Amino acid sequence: MVADQEPPATDRHPAHQASLLNQRLQLALRSSHSGIWELDIAAGRLEWDDRMLEIYQWRREDFDGSRAIWSRRVHPDDLAKVEAVRVKALNGELADYKIDFRIVRPDGSLRFVEDHGSVQHDAQNRPIRLVGLHRDTTEERQMRDALKVTEQRWQLAIEGSNDAVCDWDLKTNVLYHNRHWIGQLG
């Protein structure tokens, strides 16, 4: 399309724009491996998309949408923290929130999730719905923990060797060195 030409009429149509926006949202959700949830506050009913069911390892027919069935999957040590954030959000203390907690899947495996939520209000500013997304962060945590162990092992090996170690990052001009390097060079 030439810069000074108008887009086709179908590109300006609200339904077409909504469809494009929905396609972008679906791509973003698939790329981030996030599941969408919604809590109808008055009914106390949860709605989950397929990715949420996948994160929790639930079949659609086994998920009844109750908060009680969901809360049984939250790790017992994390449930009070999760509920406290929900109460604060519903009381208007938090417009949006992010919280990390653990869940226990039916097979007993432990998973870490990052939960982002937002409260929606009616015309009288009463909370009517919580909407959010979950992202399974288990693999990220496992990689971070493995990296930390590797770093600790490397530090022990360097300290035990009595070798002087120096690493100079020329791009940032940051110099890393161990205590033996200082001792040898002064």
Image (cartoon, rainbow, N blue to C red):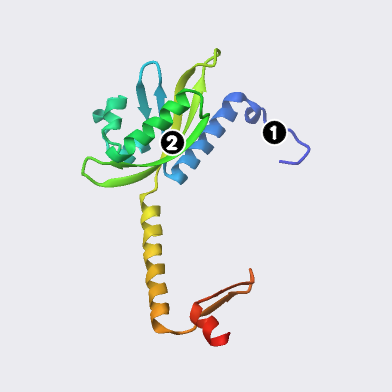
The residue drawn where x is 38% and y is 34% is 82
Looking at the image, is 32 positioned above or below residue 88?
below
**Residue 83 drawn at (x, y percent):** 37, 30
Compared to residue 183, the image places residue 128 above or below, namely above
Instruction: Compare residues 71 and 175 and report the one nearer the observer.
Output: 175
Question: 75 or 15: nearer the eye?
Answer: 75
Kindly check if marks 1 and 2 are in contact, taking CB atoms under 8 A apart as contact.
Answer: no
**SS type, badge 2:** strand
Local packing at callout 2 (Cα closer than 10 Å; few below 14, some 14-19, many 20+) is many
Residue matched to label 2: 133
- The disc label shown at residue 53, or none: none
Q: Quick check: 92 left or right of 85?
A: right
Amino acid type at image mark 2:
Leu
Residue at left offset 39%, top offset 68%: 152
Instruction: Work out whether residue 179 can be spotted.
Output: yes
| Residue marked by disc 1 | 7
Disc 1 residue type (three-letter): Pro
Q: Is residue 49 visible?
A: no
Single out the mark in the foreground, 1 or 2.
2
Residue drawn 30% across and 37% down?
74
> Circle 1 sits in a helix, a strand or a loop, which is it?
loop
Give coordinates of residue 3: x percent, y percent: 76, 41
**In this picture, residue 126 sits left or right of residue 11:** left
